Amino acid sequence: MKRIFLQKKQNKTILELLREQGKYLDAPCSGKGTCGKCCIIIEETRKTDPPKQREKEVFTERELEEGWRLSCMTVPTDDLYVCIPEIRENQIQVQMEFVRNTKMESDVQATTVICENKIEDRAQIGSDGEIKPENMDTEKSVYGIAIDIGTTTLAAELISLTDGICLKTASSVNHQRAYGADVISRIRAAASGDAEKLRESILKDVRNLAETLLAGQDENVLNVSKIVIAGNTTMIHLLLGYSCVGLGAAPFTPVNLAPEDMTWGELNGEYEETRESGDARESGDAKESGVARDGSDAREHGYVRECGHTGINQTTKVQIMPGISAFVGGDITAGMMGCGMRPDKCEMLIDIGTNGEMVLAAGDHFLVSSVAAGPAFEGGNISCGMPGVLGAVCRAVLFGKNNMVTKTIGNKPAIGLCGTGIIDVMYELVRHHIVDTQGILGEPWFEKGFPVVPGKIYFTQEDIRQVQMAKAAICAGLEVLLQKSNISHEQIKKVYVAGGFGMGLDMEKALGIGLLPIGLRGKLTPVGNSALEGAARCLTHSKESSDMQPQEIAAISHEINLADTPEFQELYLKHMQFC
């Protein structure tokens, strides 16, 4: 455990005090008291206000006596010491690999378990699935870095631009989780005065990833010439210091969706300038003030010096992938590029997370949309839910009506349910008619919940409601895209299912609970980290390449606003049912 001293401040909770100190504590509900996850131990309980009712629900009387409290609900009445338990989020499994064929058992995969910036060496995997040798002339190498900024985790690759070989991968938890598990929570936090803290947090994560990738490289031959970053619109706004106010309320207007080009120094604030969209830069209208933080000319301070301790030159080019809308960002643009999608292929892309994004190739354009699925598929808003960490239940099968057999990540003792485990449990309860078509949990389990792991992990009625709402939103959104384009399920040739959740998902069980339309059976292809793959392709593509470029993809992508679509509301209610 980490022991931290806190000085009391007027009406500030322990969570707020920890944030001020830059101490990370996972708070998926952003301090609302609903998730019960921001647990800490107080050494002197008399120095705080009494436990709230919610805390009495989360902790036993003995645990409260031992000092266990929810940091978001506890206000110190005096200076005190608190202890933060081991951060399980540092062990979240991160899907690093992009799968290039459908024979899952023969693919080389690198789904890594991270422990605060874990690094992996790996060879490049060709389109034929063969591993290419890593022998290369490092003295002639120029490097690039591809980064995928996810709401929960970050992933990055160090790539040799001379031969396209990926040398190392690194991953990290997104420490903005201290301000909430979903983008809406972070938008609200930014609008409430924490925007700069959120930006500092993500910049630190990005710098740490770069530093991890470059650790041990020979500085005499290392030359990182370009960095490509993909992320959803909110993550990119927070990274660049843009206002998120327009993302938090209708009509949901981003500051900028165009591709951004800057230097590493500019991104990190070492050299400030007024950044405008890519179009403005090309036309020469962008203003470059060249003013450092102290008001002097930044070039006088060694503009070409290394930025921080990452080993990356300040003048290294940074490209931000273009977004499509407020809730369909550059990570989806990158994912489309990574999958090699073209509008005439009659394919779909689905990325299921807190925000479920979906794409349909519709002839001469792409139809895109997104739904607020909520954090249920990442363990959020589920009583026993958690990210994919060691000990999280990831597989479950029910024998009879009493014997739930489970498998955990790392084969560790069960401590909760991750997203794939939640889907498995939900499917088994529906299959055995323990949950009816309306989503009602039968007796004798209605009050306490069904014992997934008796005495330890229970799946409750409220958990079922969270899954119902999330799966109905995803399925209804996909159906609307097909209806709007007059394309049938039968016409769809392939559906790319992106992300770590999609990679571990049992597709038959997802179809069985109505998370995905039954008409897409046999067309679902897990592909892994398509956003990171797209960012990597941006580093290595040539002008002669036949692949569509990010700007082209974004330009022909048209969003359907599901909130204003009557068909979505009808389908949503329909798909709330368990058939």
Image (tube, rainbow, N blue to C red):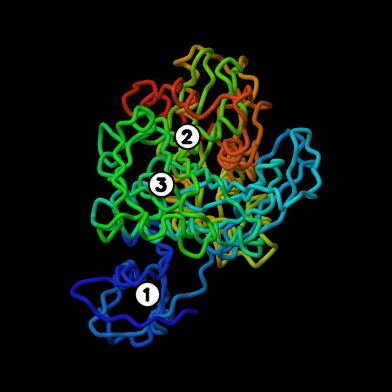
Q: Which residue is mark 3?
A: 235
Circle 2 SS class: strand
Pick the quarter of the image with the C terminus.
Answer: top right
Under mark 1, the amino acid is: Arg
- Name which residue lies at 71% across and 35% down: 100
Which residue is pictured at 78% across the width and 33% down the height? 128
Name the residue carrying label 1: 69
- N-terminal-most mark, 2 or 3: 3
Camera-side mark, 1 or 2: 2
Q: Is residue 33 left or right of residue 460?
A: left
Count residues near mark 1 (Cα–Cα under 10 Å), then give few for <14, some for 14-19, many for 20+.
Answer: many
Which residue position is annotated with label 2? 357
Whole-percent x and y of residue 319?
47, 41
Residue 260 place in picture, x, y as percent: 41, 38
Question: What is the spatial separation of the Cα atoms under label 1 and label 2, in whole angstroms?
Answer: 36 Å
> Left of 33 or right of it: where is 310?
right
